[in-house]
Amino acid sequence: MRNAFMIVALTAMVLAGCSQKRSNDAARRKAATIKDPTVYARIESTGNDSISVALLADSSLITVGVANAAEHKAIAGELTRGDTLAMVLDDGGRSMVAGVNVSQLVGLWLCDDGSGNGLRLAPDGAASSVGTGKLTLRTWRIDNGRLVLTYIMPDGTDYTEKPARTRIVLLASDSLRIEVNDTVMGYTRSSGLLTI
């Protein structure tokens, strides 16, 4: 009788654990299916308050209003013909809420403190630290108008990639300022350096 009770108790614990695991798995799958609203496009032409772009996903041409995003300073970089733009559109898909000029963002950026440290953002989404830093960068992406950098600890204590969501304060052809945890970091491109 005692053995039967133990078997029933163990079976109940295993089933409860499996049920909990299934609900955790379902929550993880649901979280993974939340779609990033970022749309990638090539700028075809620019106007006063709108741009024409070719969506990279299917090459369709659309015209997007940029006045609201420009007014709210939600566009990082310049809107230059031929450049790749990561943008978040409103529900109707006719107006930009936020945008990042990816063509200006990729390349080699050195800290403006003269330390020689910095970061390199590759067009394929790879990221790497330059010099000696507190983090080893692994990847980058634009998510909902924000720059997300993933990193690991360089000392080998933890190889788990962690994301750092940043806000691009300034993006120009020779200047980048990003805010991470209320700290603004400045980067520049030096003339004569290979920046691909």
Image (spheres, grey):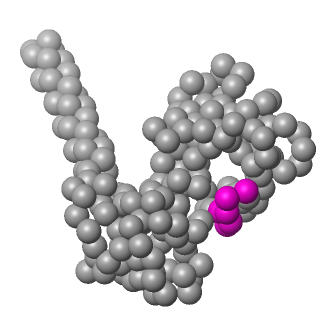
Q: Nearer the viewer, residue 64 or 194?
A: 194
> Does residue 191 appear to the left or right of 113 in the view shown?
left
> Does residue 49 appear to the left or right of 165 in the view shown?
left
Image x and y of residue 75, in percent: 54, 72
Q: Nearer the viewer, residue 159 or 101?
A: 101
Question: Which image quarter is the N terminus in?
Answer: top left
Residue found at the far top of this picture: 3
Q: Which residues are magenta?
A: 169-174
Q: Nearer the viewer, residue 181 or 177?
A: 177
Image x and y of residue 37, in percent: 34, 63
Image x and y of residue 66, in percent: 45, 81
Residue at 39% x, 60% y is 42
Task: State which quadrant residue 121 falls in.
Answer: top right
Residue at 20% x, 26% y is 14
Residue at 51% x, 55% y is 102
Residue at 25% x, 35% y is 21
Question: Does the magenta portion include 171?
Answer: yes
**Residue 67, relative to residue 143: is it above or below?**
below
